[in-house]
Amino acid sequence: MYAQMVKSEASNEDPEKLAEFQARIDADIKIEPKDWMPQAYRKTLIRQIGQHAHSEIVGQLPEGNWITRAPTLERKAILLAKVQDEAGHGLYLYCAAETLGVSRDELTEMLLDGRMKYSSIFNYPTLNWADIGAVGWLVDGAAIMNQVPLQRTSFGPYSRAMIRICKEESFHQRQGYDAIRKMAEGTPEQRKMAQDAMNRFWYPSLMMFGPSDKDSVHSAQSMAWKIKINTNDELRQKFVDQTVPQAEYLGLTIPDPDLKWNEERGHYDFSEPDWSEFFDVIKGNGPCNVDRLAARNKAWDDGKWVRDGLLAHARKKQSGNLAAE
Amino acid sequence: MSVSVSNDALHQFLLRMGDNTLILGHRVSEWCGHAPVLEEDIALANTALDLIGQTQMWLGLAGEIDGGKSADDLAFLRDAWDFRNVLLVEVPNGDFGRTLMRQFLFDAWHSIMLGRLMTSADDRVAAIAAKASKEVAYHLERSGGTVVGLGDGTEESHARMQEALDYLWPYVGEMFASDEVDAQMVAAGIAPNPTDLREEYDALVGRILTQATLSIPESQFAHKGGRDGRMHTEHLGHLLTQMQWLQRAYPGAKW
């Protein structure tokens, strides 16, 4: 899940308009940018889509970390294609957010100065090659859990962006699983890398769904508006149920001694992640927060002359064209 | 001309093509996540991806005629002296301006070269060239457009692009050097004499750089030593250290 703990806003608008709006959503009619919408719906969506877009952008960094060291040309090409897809997802999502009246530059500045967040998962490092497999398998796997239902979200541009994104994400997850499978079936050193990746990415992947939201008023509003479709706990359970047999197939051990099948519930029981660690990461104290933001800020600052130069050239051309008319 | 000599020359020629795309693809991929604007992140990753794909074809064919080696064997298990890329593609990225100028100077040569190779007497070479040339036409369009935009942008972008051109120009000449390998390629109808591509290159590059309001340095001095492997830059060893690390540290592992 690339948007976590998105706080939704309370509405105090004309009850009649609100009721009409809710009726449209209940009837599964998409809300389009020019339609009336509650301010709170707009603000919550900007936060959610913006955070998702930022996650795609910052998410280039942990994977990009291994492009130059990918062990074969094919793996290098696959990873490049994947990271390119992610930048593309960022682009669709910024475009979807722009239809709500916020510019990409404004969103970018809010990311760079820390006012907006990105997914906690990208504050963890990628330390060995199997991490690239684990990111595809576990991290993209967790993201897909959330994104598949969001294809039915009430806001048209977000829903359409999700449909495109989901097609590519399922390819990412498959390639991740394939990469880690190769390692799990490989030499003792490769198996060690795969298990090490599993050990480090398991709990951070569970954290991606956010803390339990059974008592959250914000979640209830977002669910009524269909900008959130399932609860965090439902999605986390679904992820665990899907992932455990895959890990068993690979012969990898999930680092949770209490993990076991619960016949009665028809689900796996599992340990909660350390939520104090999660809140530390959200507050900026994860292993890579400072470096990730510094890298994005450096890219933006170093690129200023490029953006300015291209803009100046476009303006010269435009005024040249006008003069010629 | 004996078959073995011809095969050896063909092998060298294929390494030159494949090492150029491998090393440049590596350099361009270093930008991932750090570009000035999102569209550039996408375009740079796309360019690197195309170049790595072309590498698989060129080095795949080189390995085939070299006793059944794989493209990966050639990419990951040779030392610097066996690489045959021109020096231009191994110089560090520098700022975005230098990266795009290097790309443009290479793309212009690459597109002309591939155009000729499409009519190669060797069908395998012609087929790779036909596929690669479509991608490279786009690379050239984009890098040329960006060089013009930045050269004729602000005072700062102009100055940076001129600096990039001044730095890189001495690496251009090597792309047009000819030796015994080239002579054999010409004789067999496999590839053109690189020297013969220069006029078209100068016309193309001159036109774009004029639009970019940039001045080509007067000196015609050209560094050399990459395409025959006699003397690479100090930078290549560091690049290979990174690129080849996993294959070297875990010999024989399948990835």
Image (spheres, coloured by chain):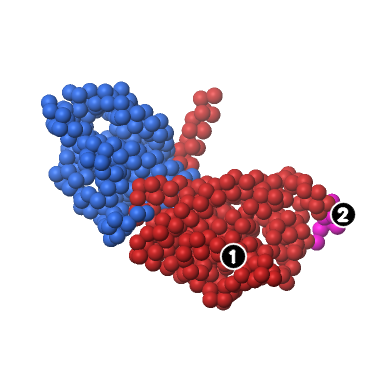
Q: Residues within 10 Å of mark 1 (few under 14, many from 20)?
A: many
The answer to whether B25 appears left or right of A109 in the picture is: left
- Decide which of tag 2 and tag 1 comes sooner along the chain: 2
Main secondary structure along the magenta-highlighted residues: helix
Q: CA distance from mark 2 to mark 1?
A: 42 Å
Up-down relation of residue B217 to residue A15 (above or below): above
Residue at 54 percent of width and 24 percent of height:
A325
Which circle, 2 or 1, is nearer the viewer?
A: 1
- Per the image, the residue denoted by label 2 is A16
The answer to whether A3 appears left or right of A135 in the picture is: right
- Residue A225: numbered disc: none
Mark 1 residue element: helix
Q: In this rendering, do the residues under marks 2 and 1 share a single chain? A: yes
Q: Quadrant of residue B224?
A: top left
Residue A114 at x, y percent in the picture: 54, 64
The chain shown in blue is which?
B
The answer to whether A41 appears left or right of A137 in the picture is: right
Which residues, given as a range, are shown in magenta?
Answer: A12-20
Residue at 85 percent of width and 55 percent of height:
A19
- Per the image, the residue denoted by label 1 is A240
Residue A290 versus residue A202: which sits nearer the camera? A202
State the hue of chain A.
Answer: red
Q: Given the image, what chain letter belongs to the residue carrying mark 2? A: A
